[in-house]
Image: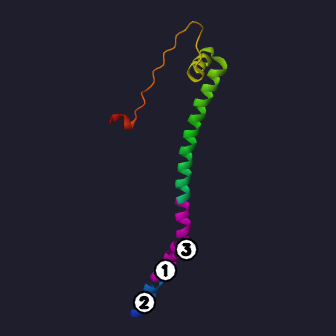
Amino acid sequence: MKVDLGIWDILTRLIIILLVAAGLLGVGIWYWPVITTNEKMRKEVMRLDEQIKVEEERIKLLKNASDALQHDTNAIERLARENLNYARTNEIVIRFETPLTNGSASH
């Protein structure tokens, strides 16, 4: 047998709904700093993952260059010619340099 309590039944249901909503809102407010911190950390992890990829590519290039210098005599010769200005015997080296411009020379 169901008894109709009228307004009290409606108010009881409304209070229960409002308590549940307040509880959910309280949990949301309680965990909001954790959620924002988690989002910041996730962005930082993504940035660091990208940086790791860049550095791994750089390591790969440096390792290839190191291997070439250890095993390839042509690479060593090219490096000596470019950086140390070495040349072979009876070889003529021509260097092209960009002209220096002086602002006062235009008068």
The image position of residue 70, as x and y in percent, is: 67, 21
Please rate how many residues cluster around mark 2, counting C-alpha atoms within 10 Å: few if below 14, some from 14 to 19, many from 20. few
Q: Is residue 74 above or below residue 33?
A: above
Quarter of the rendering containing residue 52: top right
Residue 34 magenta: yes
The image position of residue 8, as x and y in percent, is: 43, 93
Q: Is residue 5 visible?
A: no
Please rate how many residues cluster around mark 1, counting C-alpha atoms within 10 Å: few if below 14, some from 14 to 19, many from 20. few
Q: Nearer the viewer, mark 3 or mark 2?
A: 3
Question: Disc 1 and disc 2: Cα gap in Å?
Answer: 16 Å
Considering the image in quadrants, where does the C terminus appear?
top left
Quarter of the rendering containing residue 6: bottom left
The residue furthest top is 90
At label 1, which amino acid type do we have? Ala
Q: Is residue 9 above or below residue 74?
A: below
- Magenta region, residue range: 17-39
Q: What residue is shown at x 55% (from left), y 74% (from top)? A: 30
Disc marking residue 11: 2
Asked if marks 1 and 3 touch (Cβ < 8 Å), the reply is: no
60 vs 46, nearest the viewer: 60
Q: Nearer the viewer, mark 1 or mark 3?
A: 3
Helix or strand or loop: what does disc 1 sit on? helix
2 vs 101, nearest the viewer: 101
Helix or strand or loop: what does disc 2 sit on? helix
Residue beneath disc 1: 22
Disc marking residue 30: 3
Question: Which one is earlier in the sequence, the residue at label 1 or at label 3?
Answer: 1
